[in-house]
Image: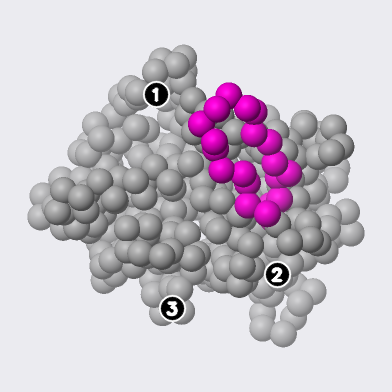
């Protein structure tokens, strides 16, 4: 195994896999502020297509005009996992002894370039462009779900240097792996515990409760609700959830996707305008592709996590959180 090859190592204390990807230290950085002058050569701008890997998906601005692209999905040039032409064995199961476990970090790591405009951000792209972005998310998850070796896809955005972005140009990332991520596994364990207590889906119950109380609702549409969770970890944290129990994001129909795009776009626009373009992350949580029972599924949802206060030693060292903005006040400020 090359010293630069991504590798998985198992932490038997936390019972999670850690990805070692030394080559990611070589990825380019231009992000020293929210908006700055365009660098001499941005790999995500139109005209730089020759310096990136070939597109996996291109969504044109106008149907049939592939040259005038609006969204490009490309392999990450500095991946945390790498595809393999051979059949992928699953990571070895923990045995309970102290023997270190390691495994080749196989999978797909992709970048969604969400606009050819270097200075675009989520609050200034138009609604049609945001719909193209969300469609690219769905289409890539749909394609990756066909690979029997892939168990789950994580999709996320780092917006701003305070949220871990290395390039200013608007983009998100996805990572498809032959195992379920630790955070999704924790959420599934919560579903299992709820069902063992005779309860239903925790997210369905959350939506029902919050729609009655209304104090933490940011927006309600026909099929979706945006809310600030009762125990928000981050100041102005928002979740977007389907109002009915839907387990797999990639199965969303076009009409519902269009509605989601509008809700998601306005939620991010409110965050950026009301809190002066803070750094933030969002993550899409969806069920593993091949679930064997309802206990292994999630109510898919999106979590938007602003970095208004930042994360410090207490949060890292204890796993607990300090939030300086009550979710009820945040919801009132973000409401649309």
Q: Which residue is mark 1?
A: 319
What is the quadrant of the N terminus in the image? top right
**Which residues are the magenta region?**
89-110
Q: Are marks 2 and 1 in contact (CB under 8 Å)?
A: no
**In the foreground, 27 or 278:** 27
Is 306 in the magenta?
A: no
Is 92 in the magenta?
A: yes
Mark 2 to mark 3 CA distance (whole Å): 19 Å
Characterize the local packing of mark 1: few (<14), some (14-19) or many (20 or more) Cα atoms within 10 angstroms: few
Q: Which residue is mark 3?
A: 253
Name the mark nearer the viewer: 2 or 1.
1
Tell me which secondary structure the magenta stretch mostly adopts: loop
Find residue 121 and report its horizontal and vertical position in percent: 57, 50
Q: Residue 132, can we see it? A: no
Characterize the local packing of mark 2: few (<14), some (14-19) or many (20 or more) Cα atoms within 10 angstroms: some
Rendered view: 97 above or below 237: above
Looking at the rendered structure, which numbered label has been put on residue 57?
2
């Amino acid at each position: 195994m090359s010293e630069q090859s991504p590798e998985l190592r198992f932490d038997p204390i936390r019972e999670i896999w850690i990805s070692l990807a030394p080559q990611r230290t070589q990825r380019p950085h231009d992000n020293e502020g929210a908006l700055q002058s365009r660098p001499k050569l941005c790999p995500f701008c139109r005209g730089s297509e020759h310096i990136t890997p070939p597109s996996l998906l291109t969504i044109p601005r106008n149907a049939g005009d592939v040259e005038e692209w609006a969204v490009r999905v490309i392999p990450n040039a500095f991946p945390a996992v790498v595809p393999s032409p051979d059949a992928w064995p699953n990571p070895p199961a923990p045995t309970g002894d102290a023997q270190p476990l390691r495994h080749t970090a196989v999978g797909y790591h992709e970048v969604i370039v969400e606009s050819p405009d270097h200075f675009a951000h989520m609050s200034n792209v138009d609604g049609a462009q945001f719909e193209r972005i969300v469609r690219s998310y769905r289409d890539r998850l749909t394609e990756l779900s066909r690979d029997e070796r892939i168990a789950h896809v994580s999709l996320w955005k780092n917006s701003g240097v305070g949220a871990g972005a290395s390039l200013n140009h608007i983009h998100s990332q996805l990572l498809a792996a032959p195992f379920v991520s630790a955070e999704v596994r924790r959420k599934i364990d919560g579903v299992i515990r709820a069902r063992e207590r005779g309860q239903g889906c925790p997210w369905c119950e959350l939506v029902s409760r919050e729609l009655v109380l209304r104090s933490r609702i940011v927006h309600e549409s026909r099929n979706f609700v945006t809310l600030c969770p009762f125990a928000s970890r981050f100041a102005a944290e928002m979740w977007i959830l389907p109002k009915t129990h839907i387990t797999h994001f990639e199965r969303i129909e076009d009409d519902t996707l269009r509605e989601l795009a509008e809700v998601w776009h306005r939620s991010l626009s409110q965050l950026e305008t009301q809190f002066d373009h803070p750094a933030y992350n969002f993550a899409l949580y969806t069920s593993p592709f091949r679930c064997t029972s309802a206990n292994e599924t999630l109510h898919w949802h999106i979590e938007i996590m602003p970095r208004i206060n930042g994360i410090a030693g207490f949060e890292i060292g204890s796993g607990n959180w300090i939030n300086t903005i009550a979710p009820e006040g945040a919801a009132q400020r973000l409401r649309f």
